């Protein structure tokens, strides 16, 4: 009488198949994950620009023109007012700035990516007093504006 001893464990072929499947799944999932993370960071710029638009309108309600700088006191007819805001976005992925020279009827606020975060698809975001996106960085076509701003 001869009894066979059955060994437990995995064969090399089974391990190679599992490693190949994991590699394929990783290759598919990683680009989707990185795109999702970048899209999430873009929302940081949008939130900061919305805050700055609100702050500019509050400032303009008390002053004869829009603010020319962020976080600085300026003399107005009604007194000294500070444009409340930060020069970085809430999650610190973008630098927020007022570009050009604001007037009584116009301003442009920009959000530029901070290193090491880089967004080659959208680059710098910008809005004017009407809440419209302006040509900034690589957002020069309607398709890019839609892709970057969401609609």
Image (spheres, rainbow, N blue to C red):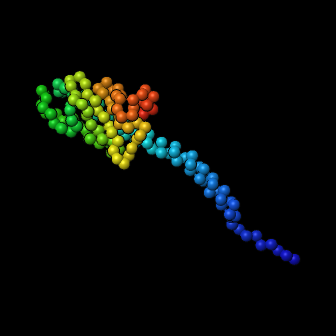
Q: Pinpoint residue 31: horizontal percent, then vertical percent.
A: 51, 45
Count of residue discs: 0
Q: Is residue 96 left or right of residue 4?
A: left
Answer with the quarter of the image where residue 77 lies.
Answer: top left
Q: Residue at x 37, y 40 (%)?
A: 44
Q: Pinpoint residue 97: horizontal percent, then vertical percent.
A: 27, 37
The answer, for residue 47, to whether it is visible in the render is no
Answer with the quarter of the image where residue 105 lies.
Answer: top left
Q: Is residue 142 left or right of residue 84?
A: right
Q: Residue at x 57, y 46 (%)?
A: 28
Q: Residue at x 21, y 39 (%)?
A: 71
Q: Pinpoint residue 27: horizontal percent, then vertical percent.
A: 56, 48
Answer with the quarter of the image where residue 107 lies.
Answer: top left
Residue farthest along the bottom direction in this orientation: 1
Q: Is residue 66 above or below residue 122?
A: above
Between 63 and 36, which is closer to the camera in this rendering?
A: 36
Q: Pinpoint residue 124: horizontal percent, then vertical percent.
A: 35, 36
Residue farthest along the top direction in this orientation: 105
Q: Residue at x 26, y 41 (%)?
A: 86
Which image quarter holds the C terminus?
top left
Which image quarter holds the N terminus?
bottom right
Between 138 and 51, which is closer to the camera in this rendering?
A: 138
Q: Is residue 23 left or right of residue 85?
A: right
Q: Is residue 35 left or right of residue 20?
A: left
Q: Is residue 122 above or below residue 34?
A: above
The answer, for residue 101, to whether it is visible in the render is yes
């Amino acid at each position: 009488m001869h009894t066979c001893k059955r060994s437990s464990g995995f064969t090399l072929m089974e391990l190679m198949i599992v490693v190949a499947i994991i590699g394929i799944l990783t290759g598919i999932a990683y680009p989707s994950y990185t795109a999702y993370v970048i899209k999430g960071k873009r929302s940081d710029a949008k939130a900061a620009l919305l805050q700055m638009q609100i702050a500019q309108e509050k400032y303009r309600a008390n002053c004869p023109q829009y603010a020319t700088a962020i976080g600085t006191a300026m003399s107005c007819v009604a007194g000294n007012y500070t444009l409340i805001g930060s020069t970085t976005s809430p999650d610190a992925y973008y630098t927020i700035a007022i570009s050009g020279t604001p007037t009584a009827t116009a301003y442009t606020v920009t959000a530029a990516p901070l290193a090491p975060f880089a967004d080659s698809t959208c680059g710098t975001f910008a809005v004017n007093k009407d809440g419209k996106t302006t040509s900034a960085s690589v957002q020069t076509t309607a398709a890019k504006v839609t892709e970057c701003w969401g609609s």
